[in-house]
Amino acid sequence: MKTIIEPFRIKSVEPIRMTTREQREAILQKAGFNLFQVHADDVLIDLLTDSGTGAMSSEQWAGIMRGDESYAGAISFYRFQERIQELTGFEHILPTHQGRASERILFELTGGPGKVIPNNAHFDTTRANAEHSGAVAVDLPIAEASDPACRHPFKGNMNVAALERLIADVGRERIPLVMVTVTNNSGGGQPVSLENLRAVRSVCDRHRLPFFLDACRFAENAYLIKRREPGQAGRPVREIVREIFSLADGATISAKKDGLSNNGGLLLLRDEALLYRASNLLILTEGFVTYGGLAGRDLEAMARGFEEVVEEDYLSYRIRSVEYVGERLGAAGIPIMQPPGGHAIYLDAAALCPHIPREQFPGQAVACGLYRLGGVRTVEIGSVMFGQGAALELVRLAMPRRVYTQSHMDYVVEVCASLYDRRDELRGLRIVHEPPALRHFTARFEEI
Amino acid sequence: MQRRSWAEPFKIKVVEHLRMTTRAERERAVAQAGYNTFLLRSEDVYIDLLTDSGTSAMSDRQWAGMMLGDEAYAGSANFYHLESAVREYYGYKHVIPTHQGRGAEHILSRLCIKAGDLVPGNMYFTTTRTHQELAGGQFVDVIADVAHDPGALHAFKGNVDLEKLARLIEQAGPSRIPYISLHATVNMAGGQPISMANARDVSVLCRRHGIKVFLDATRAVENCYFIKQREPGYADTTLGEILRELCSYTDGCTMSGKKDCLVNIGGFLALNDDDLAEAARNMVVIFEGLHTYGGLAGRDMEAMAIGIRESVQYEHMHARVGQVQYLGEMIEREGVPIVRPIGGHGIFLDALAFLPHMPRDQYPAQALAAALYVDSGVRAMERGAVSAGRDPVTGENHFPKLELVRLTIPRRVYTQAHMDVTAESVVGLHRRRDRIVGLKFTYEPKHLRFFQARFEPFEGSKVLRD
C-alpha cells in the first residue's frame, strides 16, 4: 500500500470560521500587517506554529482527568519522570511551564557577559534568552544550509570545523556550553545526523565543554535519521532517540512540539551542582520541583505524549504529510526550502518575490499575502525575526500535529499556488512601531 | 444560640480516590521525606492541607471551558475572555497572563525595582520577597503590629500601619520606593484581611508621593467577603462591587489564579499604566510566552475566566470561608492555640504556644507539621522560621514573631467529615504534645529553603513518640 493514512481517527472537532477577503483586508490593517496580532478566530488554517497547537489523543485527555493537582509530590509527576527517564536515559528531570523557561534557567546559570554560546542555529527565544543574560549567541550551520535549493539530507548539521575555529578564537573558558538544535527550526526544520552529533560530542570532549541539545523535535529528527542516514534504517526510533540523548550533558525541551502537548517544557541535566542551582531558580520563577509551574494534568498529558510521539506509524504519517505538501508546492514551481523538513514547509520568499528588497521584508509580504488571499496564517522567518543577521528570507508553514486533514492541505497548496501566480502584485513593508526585543511578535507595519 | 448551618452551593460531579495508610507506613514516609511535608509523595497523604494553591476542584462549567481551549499561539479567543473577565471584575486596563503568580511577581519586580530600592508591604511572602531581593530591592514590613500577635482579635489584622509607611517614605524618600506591595488577604499573618478604609488611606498617602500601589490580589475576593461581613457600610454591597472598589485604590496587581480564581494553573499581571504594560508585554514574551497566552494553554485561560465569575458569587464565598470557620471553631473550642480571628483560607496553629517546651532552633512548627502527618496522614505546612530563611547579610536565622503551622483548605475539595477527622487529629495531638520531638537540619538550600530542606529528629528516631 503506497498511501500512508493517519494512525488515528477524529474524536473531537473544533469549528473554524470562514471569513471573506474584504474582512481579512480590514483585519490585516488592524493587526498592523503582523499575523501574531490577528485574533485566532479570524484565521481559517493556522500554520503560525506547530508549538502547543497539536491535538491530544483520547489517552492524553484521560490523563488530563487523572491529573493529581497536589502541590508537592503529585503522582502525576512521578509518572512523568519515569516516562522521561525511560525515553532519554537522563536521571534528573525538571518540568517547566514551557521550553523558553528551561532556556532562561539554563542561560541565567551558564551565560552572562563575555560568554559565547555556539549553536547550529539558535531559534528566536533561545537567542533572546542567551542574549538577555549578556552572552553572545553564535550560529554555526554548515554551508549547504544557506542554499534553499540544495537537497543535502542533513542540512541541520553543525559546522564542526567552524566550532573548532570558534573555540580556538575565543578560548574554551568563554564558552559555557555547545548547543545543537534538533531539528534545526530557523534553518528549515532540517535534521542533524547522528554522525554530526557524535562529531560535536568529540570536539566537546576534547575541549572539556558541556554539550546541550535543544531537543524540541527530537522524535522527528530521529525518524529522519532512520530514513536518511546510512546504517540506521533497521533501528527502532526509540533506540535512535536514546542514542541522541546519550551524547548530551543536558537538554532543553518544549513539550509543545514532540511532547504532543499544549504546554509544558523540560530541562534535563547530568551535572548535580548545576541541577542544584537550577532547582533553586526553578522554584523561584516557575514552581516547585515536582510541578514546575504546570498543572498535574499537564504532566500526565506530557508523559503520554512523549510515548505516542516515538510510535513509528505516527512519525511516518507526520513526516509524510509534511512531505506531501512540499511535493505539491514543488510541482507547482513554488520555490521552497529543500528537502522538506520535519515539521514545516518553508517558502523561499527571496526567490518568490525578487522585486522586493530585503529591507522591505519579502517574507512578511508573502505571509500577509497568504492571509489576505486565503485566511492561511504563517510566520516570517527572516529579516523581521532575526534582523540583519538573517541568513534567509523564509515563510514557514508549520504543521500542527494531528490537527489538519489532507483536504486542508490541498486548500493551502491552492492558496500558495494562487499567490505565486500573482506574486508581482506583492508589495514590500516598512516598520512603523518596534519593541526593543523579539520584535516580530508585536511590531507594526505598513505597506509601501 | 443555635448554630446556623451552611451547605455547599454545589454537588459533587467527579471524585478522586484516596489511599489509606497505617501509622508505620507514615513514619517511614515522613523519614524518607526528611521530615519536610513538601517532600512527601501525594499518594502517601490522606487529607492534603499543604496549600490551597492550585488544589481546588473546578466546576463542570470550567471543565466545559477546558474543552473550548483555543490553542492558537497568537490571539487565542480564550485570552480575550480572560481579559474581559479581569477588566469586568478587577477593573484594570491591561491584562498580561502568566503561567502562575510568581511569573507575574518576577516581571513586576524586574520592571520596577532597582538596586537599593525599598519595597514596603503588609508582611512578607516567601516568593514575593525573594523576587524583590533578587531585583536588588529590600522588603520593609509596614503591617500593623497587632498582626504579629496571634491571639489578638482585630477585624482587619492585615492592615498597613500608615504611620510606619509615612515614616519610611519620609526617611528613605519617595524616589527609593518604587511601589508598595499590598496583600489582601495577608497569607503569612493567617489569612487576615485589610479593610477598605485602609486600602483607601494607603492609596491616598502613596499617590501624594507618586508611589505606586500594587495589590497582591491572590485572595482578594476572600478579603472582600470579610469587608462585606465586618466593615460598616458594605453589608449590602456585592462582592463584585467591593472588589472593583478595592482594586480602584491600586495601580495594578499580581495574581495567582490558583487561589481565588479556582484553577489548577495560571496567573496574571494587571496594570493601568500604558507604558509599564508595554514594557511588561515585551518582558513576558521572553520569560513566559507571547502576551496573549503567557505560558498557559488556551484552555487554562478559559477555566480562569470562568473561575473569576464563580469566585465573586456570594454563596460560593460564604461556603468557602464558612468551611474554614467550621474547622477553626472545632479546634479552638478544645483549647488548641490558633491565630485569631480565623482567616479566609486556612487555620494557622500557633506552634510556639502549642509546643512551649520546644526551643525555636528546633523548629517547633516544622516538628508539629511532621507529627500531624504521622498521627493521621493530614499534610500541613510550616510557616515560621524555616520559611522565613536567613538574613542575606548576616546569615542568621530569621525568627519571625509567628511560628505557625498552616492547615490550608483547598476550595470545593474536602467535605465536613474530612474537616472532622482533621480537627480530631489536631486536638488529640495537642493533648499528647509532650511527645512531639524537635528537628534539626540535615540539608539546607540557600533560597526558599522550606521547599527542599531535610531534617532529622533532634533526639531519638521519631518526631512523634509512641
Image (tube, coloured by chain):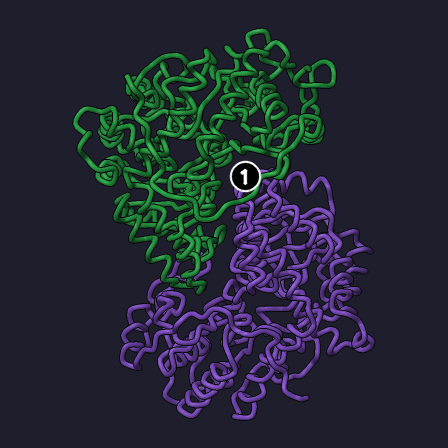
Up the image or down, A235 lies above or below B180; here it is below
Give left or right: position of A44 versus B242: right
Q: Position of residue A344 (x, y in %)?
A: 56, 75
Quick check: can you spot residue B170? no
In the rendered picture, chain A carries what hue? purple
Q: Quadrant of residue B145?
A: top left
Please state which of residues A38 and B84 is positioned toward the viewer in this rendering: B84
Instruction: Name which residue lies at 64% across and 29% down.
Output: B453
Up the image or down, A355 lies above or below A85; here it is below
Q: How many marks?
A: 1
Up the image or down, A163 lies above or below B192; here it is below
The crowding category of the residue bearing disc 1, from other C-alpha atoms within 10 Å (few below 14, some 14 to 19, many at least 20), is: many
Instruction: Name which residue lies at 39% across and 49% down.
Output: B304
Residue wearing tag 1: A71
Please state which of residues B356 and A344 is positioned toward the viewer in this rendering: B356
In the rendered picture, chain B carries what hue? green
Instruction: Name which residue lies at 53% across and 19% down.
Output: B426
**Chain for numbered disc 1:** A
Q: Quadrant of the N terminus of chain A?
A: bottom right
Q: Position of residue A358 (x, y in %)?
A: 46, 77
